[in-house]
Image: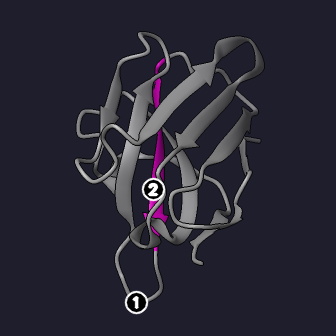
Amino acid sequence: QVQMIESGGGLVQPGGSLRLACEASGRTFISHTMAWFRQVPGSVRESVAAIRWSSGMTFYDDSVKGRFTISRDNGKSLVFLEMNSLRSDDTGVYYCAAGPYVVDWRSESAYRYWGQGTQVTVSS
């Protein structure tokens, strides 16, 4: 049984930093793309960043480029999202997702496995 468990969310002031982690288990992910999405109440879930497990190639939404970094630890099946210079519009529930042979990393339907989400609140 595949499990995706996020951690690391919390309350942070504008300009601060947080590091999210996603522990993926239950299968091998060598052919998968791992991604982070976020959602605020009343809005659609939006893509934030993704990484190809095998090659390490990364993708970012324009809104987070230069501030967020996605990475993975192959040995421990962990995916990280390092978030710096946080802004109030980064607030939301952040979800980790995994999908095989993903073509469009922004497409929710491309991801088969999802975590339960972790809340990130950026506020003074």
Contact between labelled residues 2 and 1, with CB atoms less than 8 Å apart: no
| Closer-to-camera residue (31/70) | 70
Disc 1 residue type (three-letter):
Gly
Q: Secondary structure at mark 1?
A: loop
Of the two numbered discs 1 and 2 on the same chain, state the one appearing first in sequence. Answer: 2
- Residue 42: assigned label: 1
Provide residue 104's location: percent of width, then percent of height: 23, 40
Crowding at dot 1, Cα within 10 Å, few <14 / some 14-19 / many 20+, comes out as few
Specify start and end residues of the magenta stretch as a single range. 31-39
Q: Main secondary structure of the magenta part?
A: strand
Quadrant position of the N terminus in the picture:
top right
Residue matched to label 2 = 37
Up-down relation of residue 97 to residue 123 (above or below): above
Q: Position of residue 40 (x, y in %)?
A: 46, 78
In front: 97, or 2?
97
Q: What's the residue at 35%, 54% (across, down)?
A: 47
